[in-house]
């Protein structure tokens, strides 16, 4: 997937506000919170594409570019990179909108793999299209 510099990849899947309760001891937003928000965003997109239950099976190549601050608006974008028989890999980017000027900055990105699950909790084929 390619994109113009400064442009998010994929669809906007989640938007939330970074709050003081989500900080690490340095006062920046905790990376684990950010990772969780990205996983939620990807899970929603994967669920929609799989038309049902999915589970995260891998998180690869996470890159943290910039810190997230309290008060930043976090926007997670997800785009499908690959669809296999029972799984799919999504590229998820986390962008923030910072301050009154509305500066948009990419802060984190990674590849997340989800597997489609049937009613029995076992992998099932991802439906075509």
Image (spheres, helix red, strand yellow):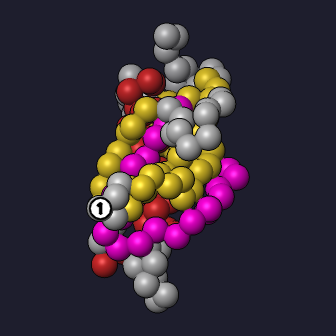
Q: Main secondary structure of the magenta part?
A: strand
The reply to whether residue 102 is in sight is yes
- The relative height of residue 12 versus residue 1 in the rendered view (above or below) is below
Residue 53, image x and y in percent? 40, 33
Q: Secondary structure at mark 1?
A: loop
The outermost residue toward the bottom is 25
Residue 5, image x and y in percent? 62, 40
User: Alpha-carbon neighbours of circle 1 within 10 Å: few (<14), some, or many (≥20)?
Assistant: few
Left or right: 82 with respect to 51?
right
Q: Which residues are magenta?
A: 57-79
Q: Is residue 58 magenta?
A: yes
122 and 70: which is toward the camera: 70
Residue visible at 49% across and 10% down in the picture: 129
101 and 56: which is toward the camera: 101
Residue 6, image x and y in percent? 56, 43
Q: Which residue is mark 1?
A: 100
Residue 22, image x and y in percent? 36, 74
Q: Is residue 62 magenta?
A: yes
- The relative height of residue 94 versus residue 124 in the rendered view (above or below) is below
Left or right: 35 with respect to 103?
right
98 and 121: which is toward the camera: 98
Residue visible at 34% across and 58% down in the picture: 101
The reply to whether residue 114 is in sight is no
Q: Quadrant of the N terminus?
A: top right
Residue visible at 40% across and 79% down in the picture: 23
Left or right: 99 with respect to 124?
left
The image shows a total of numbered marks equal to 1
Location of residue 11 (image quadrant): top left
The outermost residue toward the top is 129
């Amino acid at each position: 997937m390619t994109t113009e510099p400064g442009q998010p990849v994929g669809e906007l899947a989640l938007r939330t506000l970074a709050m003081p309760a989500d900080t690490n001891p340095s006062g920046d937003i905790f990376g684990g919170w950010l990772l969780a928000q990205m996983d939620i965003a990807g899970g929603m997109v994967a669920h929609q594409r799989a038309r049902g239950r999915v589970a995260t099976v891998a998180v690869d190549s996470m890159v943290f570019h910039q810190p997230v601050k309290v008060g930043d608006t976090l926007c997670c974008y997800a785009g499908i990179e690959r669809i296999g028989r029972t799984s799919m890999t999504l590229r998820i980017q986390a962008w923030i909108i910072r301050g009154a000027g509305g500066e948009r900055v990419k802060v984190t990105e990674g590849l997340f793999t989800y597997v489609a699950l049937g009613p029995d909790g076992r992998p099932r084929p991802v439906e075509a299209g």
